[in-house]
Structures are given as structure tokens and as C-alpha cells.
């Protein structure tokens, strides 16, 4: 046995469940980021940022959220910004790698050439297969970021007269932030200055969408994009619902903000469509905003809440309960309304265990958002619409805000830190925990019907 394989196996053997690996790994990354951001050279003032600011920023970066309580460009030095970019990269690659491995572990095969087998009792993986999948995820991620960085660098260099070094730095930083659905930007108004620039907006939006689809879906699409009939259920649900949410979100924002002079009302018609589309993409948990979120109508806030709660695809950099969970719940409801005993998706039958997992994740997430909203309302003077927006944004790791993040107080900020951490690790760990905890009962109890509704 190779030395690397031996130590990796020994390390993983210390954990009894994959959820422990996810939680521990992200916790250590947050701790390391907090320490690095507290050193004086991490700030432009040369003074320590303080543990709460460092903890909040590190958690937001590792959990690829984008919520901030200090301005990224003016508060953090070059060292601090590089640390933030590194934490975003670690968080994005980490969640994609672990989520992909767990997805294949639980499903056997989802369009991946390499098969990863698990022993039923120990849940161990073949180290060679792990390296194969991890290598593909890393290459895919870096390639997407490189393409986005080249496009953005070219635009900043030629379109805005930035020096080559500065343009390259801006391109790389925002490519990493976009692909990993983080939403950190190096301008005080995020990307509002590029609201009518299709080159910048569409590049960032494309990186966000690709990163949010998930590696298994992207890999399957790369092999069989011409043959939708061969797609797996995961790919069909992810692609279909992603398209529906993007189109529906764009239409909603066009309708609700068309005449708002502080948002879309000040733009020409093509600019309105571009801004509405960009605004519909970002609640997939990216966190960039080309419009002033605080100036939007409450109806737009509610629509954004729903999009942030659903999030993006499984095994991707997006957060939320995931479009897969949302799609499965929709099919369960549809089957129940039609009186069908089984839930069918296309030509496949959905296992009862998957239905229970989707319901569990959905209800637990709703309960967490409700309790957190109540708590934050008690801690702050802000209204329900703004507080709910902030809570859903933190839980869905979206990073969008109506501008109250810095005003919720230390207790409220600690609550948001916990929400970001739970929102990033929770759905994945909960999903794997539920799937790996299946047990076969050797007997059945007598059936009894109860009144529902």
C-alpha cells in the first residue's frame, strides 16, 4: 500500500459517517480562514479585523455565500483578498468533490465513467476511484474558471482601460467567485456598474449556472447532450427545473420591476431584459447583484426568497435545498393528486426512500428558516420582509442582502454564521445520512388509516 493511500485511509477511518467528514473539513477551513483574516496584514488599515468580522467573512467565503459586514475592496488588503479567494476555491472544490462522491456512492452510477463502490458495512471507497473522480472535478472546475477569467480580463482590459495586472487580478478573482457561486466582488456596489454590459454580466451568469448544475449533470451532458432520452432522472430534473426557474424568474422580475425607477425603470428595454435575467440567475446562490436589492419591490424580495430557498443543482457549488429535492417533491404531490400508488418520473419509478428524504430535507429546512427568522426578528428592529430575506439568503448560501447584514448586531451575525455553515453542509450531510441509514425491518405492524387534512 502506498504511503499516501495508507494515511488517507487511516484519516477517513477515524470518521464513522460521511457527515463527519464534511462538517469537520469545512469547520477546519473556516477556522484557518478566520485565523488568517485576523492578522494585521489582512486589512488595509494594518490593524486586526477582529474575530467576529474575520469569522463572518471566512464562513461566508468557505460556504461560498457572499454575505459581508465590511466592504471587501476597501477593508481587506491584497493579502486578505487572496485569502478570501483561496477560501472560496477550497469551499467550492470541496463541496463539489464531496457531493459528487456521495452522489455516486448512494446511486451507484450517474453518468460517470468511473464507478465508485462502497462496502455496505464500512462505507469505504476505493482510493483509485476517489482520485479519478477528484481529478475530473478539479480539472473541470479550473477549466471553467480559466475561461471565465480570460473573458473578464479581456473586457476589463479593453473595455474599461484597466492596467493588465489589475485586469488580470479582477478577472481571476471574479471568475473564482462566480463559478463557485460565492458572489464576492471587488467593487463597493458589487457589479451594479456593469448592469448594461452583456460581456461581463453574461460571463458571470454562465459561470454561475455551470457551477450550480453539478459535476455529474455537466459530465453527463457533455457526453449525451444530443440525446435527452438517455439522460438520467437527476439530469432531467436539474436541467428542466433550472430552465423553468431561470425563465420564470426573469419574467417575474420584468413584471415587478419594469417601472421601478430605482431598478429596471432607468434602463432601456434590452438592458431591462439583461438585468432581469442576471437577477434571476443570482438567487441560485451566487450573490452578485447588478440592481440595488434594497430598492426592489417587496414582491421581488418574495420571489427572490423562493429562488434562494430552492437553490441550484446537487453536487454543485450552489446552495439551497437543491432543485432535485424541489423537483422530487413536485412529482410526489402530482402523483398524490392523481391517486397513483407510485411516483414515476419519465420511465423510472422513484423509490419510497428518496421520497421520504426529499420530504425530510424540505420540512427541516422550512423549520430552520422559520425559527431563525423569528430569532432574528427578536434580535433586530428590522421588518419581517428584510429579515426573512437575510435568513433565506444565509441558509441558501445566496449572499444577496437588502443591506441589513452589518446592522443586525453581533448576536444576529453569529446566527447568520451558523445559518451559512448549516446551509452549506446541512442538505448534503442530511441527505447522505438519511440515505445511508436505511434499515430493513423483518416484520410489519398492522396498518391503520388516519385522517389527513
Image: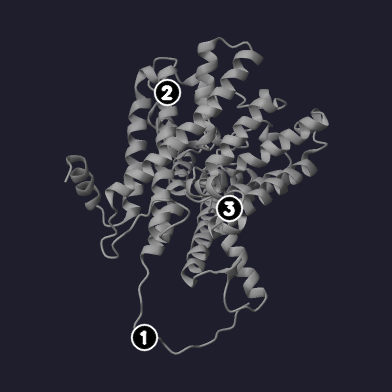
Q: Which mark is in front, 3 or 2?
A: 3
Circle 2: element type: helix
Asked whether the viewer can see residue 69, the reply is no
Vertical placement of residue 61 versus 327, above or below: above
Question: Which residue matches tag 2?
Answer: 82
Identify which residue is drawn at 38% across, 45% down: 133
Tell me which residue sits at (54%, 52%) in the image.
Answer: 322
Which residue, given by chain and number where applicable, does mark 3 sit on?
Answer: 238
Asked whether, in this view, residue 84 is left or right of residue 238, the answer is left
Q: CA distance from mark 3 to mark 1?
A: 37 Å
Q: Where does label 1 land, which residue?
A: 443
Whichever of labels 1 and 2 marks the residue nearer the N terminus, that label is 2
- Give how far apart the Cα atoms at labels 1 and 2 are: 58 Å
Residue 272 against residue 193 in the figure, above or below: below
Residue at disc 3, secondary structure: helix
Q: Residue at x 31, y 52 (%)?
A: 20
Q: Point out which mark residue 353 bears.
A: none
**Residue 68 percent location from the top left of the image:** 51, 32
Amino acid at each position: 500500500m502506498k504511503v499516501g493511500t495508507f494515511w488517507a485511509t487511516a484519516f477517513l477511518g477515524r470518521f464513522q459517517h460521511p457527515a463527519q467528514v464534511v462538517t469537520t473539513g469545512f469547520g477546519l477551513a473556516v477556522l484557518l480562514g478566520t485565523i488568517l483574516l485576523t492578522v494585521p496584514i489582512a486589512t488595509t488599515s494594518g490593524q486586526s479585523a477582529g474575530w467576529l468580522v474575520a469569522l463572518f467573512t471566512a464562513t461566508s467565503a468557505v460556504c461560498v455565500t457572499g454575505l459581508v459586514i465590511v466592504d471587501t475592496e476597501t477593508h481587506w488588503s491584497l493579502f486578505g483578498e487572496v485569502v478570501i479567494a483561496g477560501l472560496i476555491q477550497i469551499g467550492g472544490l470541496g463541496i463539489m468533490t464531496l457531493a459528487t462522491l456521495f452522489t455516486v456512492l448512494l446511486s451507484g452510477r450517474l453518468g460517470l465513467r468511473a464507478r465508485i463502490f462502497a462496502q455496505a458495512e464500512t462505507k469505504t471507497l476505493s482510493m483509485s476511484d476517489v482520485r479519478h473522480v477528484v481529478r475530473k472535478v478539479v480539472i473541470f472546475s479550473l477549466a471553467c474558471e480559466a475561461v471565465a477569467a480570460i473573458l473578464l480580463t479581456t473586457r476589463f482590459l479593453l473595455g474599461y482601460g484597466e492596467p493588465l495586472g489589475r485586469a488580470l487580478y479582477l478577472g481571476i478573482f471574479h471568475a473564482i467567485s462566480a463559478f463557485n457561486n460565492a458572489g464576492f466582488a471587488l467593487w463597493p456596489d458589487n457589479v451594479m456598474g456593469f448592469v448594461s454590459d452583456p460581456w461581463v454580466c453574461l460571463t458571470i451568469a454562465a459561470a454561475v449556472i455551470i457551477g450550480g448544475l453539478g459535476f455529474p449533470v455537466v459530465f453527463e451532458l457533455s457526453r449525451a447532450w444530443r440525446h435527452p432520452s438517455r439522460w438520467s432522472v437527476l439530469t432531467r430534473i436539474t436541467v428542466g427545473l433550472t430552465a423553468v426557474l431561470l425563465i420564470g424568474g426573469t419574467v417575474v422580475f420584468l413584471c415587478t420591476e419594469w417601472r421601478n425607477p430605482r431598478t429596471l425603470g432607468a434602463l432601456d428595454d434590452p438592458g431591462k431584459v439583461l438585468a432581469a435575467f442576471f437577477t434571476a440567475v443570482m438567487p441560485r446562490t451566487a450573490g452578485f447583484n447588478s440592481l440595488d436589492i434594497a430598492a426592489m419591490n417587496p414582491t421581488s424580495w418574495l420571489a427572490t426568497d423562493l429562488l434562494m430557498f430552492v437553490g441550484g443543482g446537487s453536487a454543485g457549488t450552489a446552495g439551497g435545498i437543491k432543485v432535485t429535492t424541489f423537483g422530487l417533491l413536485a412529482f410526489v404531490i402530482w402523483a398524490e393528486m392523481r391517486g397513483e400508488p407510485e411516483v414515476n418520473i419519465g420511465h423510472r419509478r422513484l423509490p419510497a426512500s428518496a421520497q421520504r428524504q426529499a420530504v425530510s430535507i424540505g420540512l427541516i429546512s422550512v423549520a430552520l428558516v422559520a425559527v431563525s427568522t423569528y430569532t432574528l426578528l427578536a434580535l433586530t428592529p428590522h421588518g419581517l420582509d428584510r429579515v426573512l430575506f437575510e435568513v433565506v439568503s444565509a441558509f441558501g448560501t445566496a449572499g444577496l442582502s437588502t443591506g441589513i447584514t452589518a446592522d443586525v448586531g453581533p448576536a444576529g451575525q453569529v446566527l447568520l454564521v451558523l445559518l451559512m455553515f448549516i446551509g452549506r453542509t446541512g442538505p448534503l450531510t442530511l441527505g447522505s445520512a438519511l440515505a445511508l441509514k436505511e434499515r430493513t425491518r423483518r416484520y410489519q405492524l398492522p396498518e391503520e388509516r388516519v385522517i389527513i387534512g
